[in-house]
Amino acid sequence: MLDIKTEVNGSEVIIYVDGRLDTVTSPQLMEEIEKIIPSADKIILDIEKIEYVSSAGLRVFLAADNNMRKKDGELNMRNVPGSVMDVFEMTGFSNALNILE
């Protein structure tokens, strides 16, 4: 299960993601992000409550980042849990994504 909440502050959008980001739930997050991209200059993904991320979840992060870059926007990851950061580091995503401290 995945719970997604969005907070809009002008052209900046914060997306709070809670749960497991896997093959079943990743399309739900991608759909939400795709709705937001046209009107956002900056998206912050707050993933503090992510329990697990699969390769499907990683693809969502990468696609969202690429889509924002195409429109000269910005995607930032915030509150990345240690277990997810380990996955980011093993896969090289820690260098590819903008991760806020």
Image (cartoon, rainbow, N blue to C red):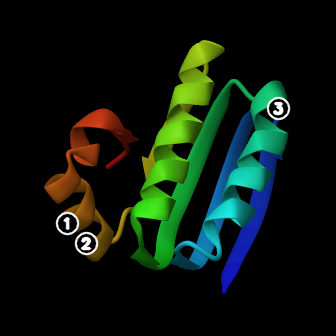
* CB contact under 8 Å: marks 1 and 2: yes
Q: Secondary structure at mark 1?
A: helix
Name the image quarter holding residue 74: top right
The structure residue drawn at horizontal position 25% and vertical position 72%, both measured from the top left corner, is 82
Q: Residues within 10 Å of mark 1 (few under 14, many from 20)?
A: some
Judging by the rendered image, the residue that carries numbered circle 3 is 10
Q: Earlier in the sequence, mark 3 or mark 1?
A: 3
**Disc assigned to residue 86:** 1
Judging by the rendered image, the residue that carries numbered circle 2 is 82
Of the residues shown, which amino acid type is indicated by label 3? Gly
The structure residue drawn at horizontal position 54% and vertical position 59%, both measured from the top left corner, is 46
Q: Is residue 97 above or below residue 25?
A: above
Of the residues shown, which amino acid type is indicated by label 2? Gly
**Disc assigned to residue 101:** none
The structure residue drawn at horizontal position 21% and vertical position 52%, both measured from the top left corner, is 91
Q: Is residue 94 above or below residue 25?
A: above
Which callout, 3 or 2, points to the residue nearer the camera?
A: 2
Give the Cα separation between the discs numbered 3 and 1. Answer: 33 Å
Q: Residues within 10 Å of mark 2 (few under 14, many from 20)?
A: few
